[in-house]
Amino acid sequence: MMIRDRNSLRAFALATCAVAAICSAPAAAQTTEAVAAEAVPPANTAEAALIGDDIIVTARRRGESLQDVPIAVSVFSGEALANKGAVDITALQQQTPNLTLQIARGSNSTLIGFIRGVGQQDPLWGFEPGVGIYLDDVFVARPQGAVLDIFEVERIEVLRGPQGTLYGRNTIGGAVKYVTKRLGDDFRAKVRGAYGSFDQIDLVGSVAVPIGGGLSVGGAVAMFKRDGYGKNLTTGADHYDKDVLAARVSLEYAPSDALFVRLAGDMTDDESNARHGHRELPNGADANSQPLRSKYDTRAGAGDKNNVETRGVSLTAEFKPADQITLKSITAYREGETDGNIDFDNTAARALDIPAQYRDDQFSQELQLLFEGDRIQGVAGVYFYDGTASGAFDTVLGNANLTIFTTGAVKTTSYAAFGDLSFDISDKLKASIGGRYTSDKREGTVFRRNFTGIRSPFFGNAAAVPGLVRSDYTNTRTDKKFTPRVSLSYQPTNDLTVYASYGKGYKSGGFDMRGDVVFTPNTVNGYDPETVDAYEVGVKGAFLDRSLFVNIAAFYADYKDQQVTRQEPTATGIASFVDNAGDSKIYGLEIEARAVLSDNVSATASFGYINADFKRFTTFDLATRQPINIQDRVVFQNTPKFSVSVAPTFQTSLAGGEIAFTPSLSFRSAYSQFELPNPILDQDGYELVDASIVWTSKDDRLQLAAHGRNLFNNRYRIGGYNFPGALFGNSVIGFYGPPRTFTVSAEVRF
């Protein structure tokens, strides 16, 4: 472990002690006459939905108790997240062991995700994510627009480890499931307004209206606005601002317990300014040697316009022809567009600017058969996916009066059949066996050409002179894989589960959309799939009349043919690689605890440890034109060795209602932004301290809250780019997480 400063060491020690304290809560609970979890008023505790008698999750595509399911799962209710002031799903990173969820470098609403060291940070079209994002069981294929704001969400489940059997090829690291609320048969409505630092204004409204005969209609609309944390000192525009409009609408029909149909649509329009980052080198000043005042400031001259739009519609139908059988259909279509740019050199010059456009659309159809017998339960189904992702961008090298234009598309057609069967060998011993067969066909088209001039004709420079064509090809590849999963669980008591499992994860091969045939002729052949063989043992226990819950998981993974994206400066441009570069071994430990310590005190805590080492890392050497093994020089990216969190909640009656105070601490040890360590960009260990106060009226109609996040105003990098050298304007830039912010809010429920 590397803890490079005293603050990080102090935070780590404090958080570790807190985890130990909660895990030893039986003694504390005995001295405070701990109440059973169900006695906690659910409306007035920040973690009430988690401390309830039974938390039902759908990790195996059917409802099961969190304490019984033989999978490492973290679950967060929407109310608990809102009561902690969580703005979007990246807040899960602070509470979930061995999870990285960040806003991608240079973006406002593009998501990168890593779980247990497995993920993908490059959001270019055609690259597959390593962590699957699901919105009401619909796979969100592209990371653009996937930083989902938290409103009208019932719960979010984080499934750690490969989920290839039930969720498919894009869940090699794990899955994040965003589950919205069903409308139900009762009228409800609410309005929430918030004001905070940097002139933050949030307005959220929702309504559910029963029409009769099992028919209900509802919707929600949200506006999130905020000035920038910094300024673009060249243009005067806000930098790191937020300007998002989002909406959902649904029509539900549930005339009986045997039938449920939901037609839902959603949209997000993000018009936040382009995010250009901050120069990290000592020469990160303007021509007059005036230093930047803030890590959130920039002197970018490429422009501030940026727009991301996503839209989706889905039709979900569930039918129970018999008590033990459920038939389910999920039909969905999604599409999105992104228009933006990143000024890599962060100056008014055109040393390294990247204007870009992305487009994507996807159609998916899934059919499931669920069976719930006395001793046998299971799910079987088929899945079809058809999607196209395309885009174009300029690599503007102003110091050479050169622009490299790149455009292309990748079309993916995927078929899968899957099944998972659980059966009770005895009253205490249970087994599960499942598998998925997937066939992926991918067609990639790549065109890349040099132009003399600043920007290509595609991005507005009609006078640019065409030059060398660097890539111009279309190719196809088909990958097929069977991904099994088996588990065995033993329950010596109703409140204790011990389990062991094995599962295989798979991510299909593809084509590098930046591929340069001149630099790397083999790029036309694409890259192969990667796989993970994952083993896990765990213990899930409920103690002291279910006032204390402790879940422990130890895991080991054999990661093969790891896909690594790399961009390397050259004398005449930038070479791109997507190699099956790595084989690695990963192992670690995760602990999650939650407890009711007294009538007025509850707490949650988590601890994650991971050791991830490459055993092989082969890459292409541009100088020798030969593959070389640099395993001794590389590390896992976005994978801190330690992640710790603790959040006690203190509550009491006040002014005709209940008030809850929740301070929270999270710590992440040092981590690298890329496989090749870079002392300028890599992040030291850091801690974040937050606090929330929430008052809820006795009738649950009014809620007032105040939230402070990053109270000690720490600066920490969440991404970066590394293009040193005069040709690229010494473009070594970092992107930073939010500074200290305060927010007050009021919510009225009808």
Image (tube, rainbow, N blue to C red):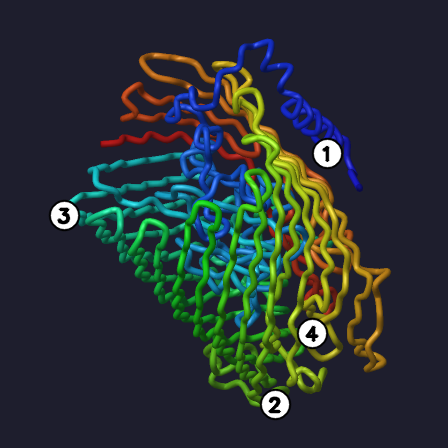
In the displayed orientation, state which residue is furthest to the front: 426
- Residue 213 is tagged as 3
Q: Amino acid at mark 1?
A: Ser
- Could you say where residue 303 lies in the image, as x and y percent from the top left? 49, 63
Residue at 39 percent of width and 53 percent of height:
136
- Residue 435 is tagged as none
Kindly report the distance in space between the C-alpha atoms of the residues bearing marks 4 and 3.
58 Å
Residue ID for mark 2? 469
- Relative to residue 367, is residue 711 drawn left or right? right
- Could you say where residue 251 lies in the image, as x and y percent from the top left? 23, 53
Q: Nearer the viewer, mark 4 or mark 2?
A: 4
- Disc 2 secondary structure class: strand
Query: For the residue carrying disc 1, how many other residues have a C-alpha within 10 Å: few (<14), some (14-19), or many (20+)?
Result: many
Kindly report the distance in space between the C-alpha atoms of the residues bearing marks 3 and 1.
58 Å
**Residue 334 lies in quadrant:** bottom left
Residue ID for mark 4? 577
**Residue 479 lies in quadrant:** bottom right
- Disc 1 secondary structure class: helix
**Which of marks 2 and 1 precedes in the sequence?**
1
- Disc 3 secondary structure class: loop
Q: Amino acid at mark 3?
A: Gly
Q: Nearer the viewer, mark 3 or mark 1?
A: 3
Q: Amino acid at mark 4?
A: Phe
Kindly report the distance in space between the C-alpha atoms of the residues bearing marks 4 and 2.
18 Å
- Residue 8 is tagged as 1
Residue at 48 percent of width and 50 percent of height:
376
**Which of marks 3 and 4 precedes in the sequence?**
3
Q: Is residue 65 visible?
A: yes
Q: Is residue 576 above or below residue 297?
A: below
